[in-house]
Amino acid sequence: MSSKQVKVIAVLTAKEGKAGELEALLRGMTAPSRGEPGNVHYNLWRHRETPGVFVIDELYADTAGAEAHRASPHYQDYLGRINDLATRNPIPLEAVDAL
């Protein structure tokens, strides 16, 4: 397992009429995700000019932390619901020069 931090940015665009449900699902992810041992930060953002577009900004201490997040019950619930609510564009990143 890598000891490097794992950064993920995910852009989610609500499907027609689903912005409220999407926001509720994403808000429900923040507290349990932040409480995971490998989580450094987990932040939810909304596009200022397009309210149905959300950005999740995640940082994990290492690969094991990111994998534990993806195996968690709240993430599995998210996976089971997200495709009905939004289109997803996850952007996995590797640090080049980051704090």
Image: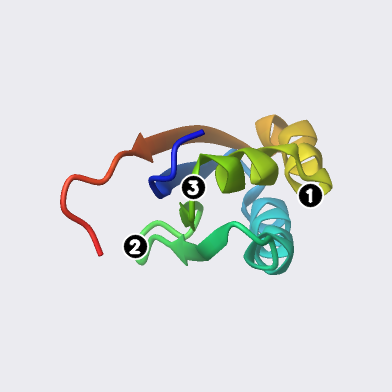
Mark 2 and mark 1: Cα distance apart in space: 29 Å
Q: Quadrant of the rendered structure where residue 93 is?
A: top left
Mark drawn on residue 13? none
Residue picked out by circle 1:
74
Q: Element type at marker 1?
A: helix
Q: Element type at marker 3?
A: loop
- The amino acid type found where label 3 is placed reads Asp
Mark 3 and mark 1: Cα distance apart in space: 19 Å
Seen at 70% across and 67% down, the residue is 35
How many marks are shown on the rendered structure? Answer: 3
Q: Element type at marker 2?
A: loop
In the figure, 27 relative to 63: above or below? below
Q: Quadrant of the C terminus?
A: bottom left
Residue picked out by circle 2:
49
Mark drawn on residue 62? 3
Dot placed on the residue nearer the N-terminal end, 2 or 1: 2
- The amino acid type found where label 2 is placed reads Glu
Mark 3 and mark 2: Cα distance apart in space: 34 Å
Q: Is residue 5 left or right of residue 64?
A: left
Point out the frontmost of discs 3 and 2: 3
Q: Position of residue 38 (x, y in %)?
A: 59, 57
Q: Mark 3 near mark 1, Cβ–Cβ under 8 Å?
A: no
- The amino acid type found where label 1 is placed reads His
Seen at 63% across and 66% down, the residue is 34
Seen at 38% across and 36% down, the residue is 91
For label 2, count other residues whose C-alpha is less than 10 Å away and answer few (under 14), some (14-19) or many (20+): few
Dot placed on the residue nearer the N-terminal end, 3 or 2: 2
Q: Position of residue 97 (x, y in %)?
A: 16, 53
Q: Is residue 39 left or right of residue 27?
A: left
Q: Mark 2 near mark 1, Cβ–Cβ under 8 Å?
A: no
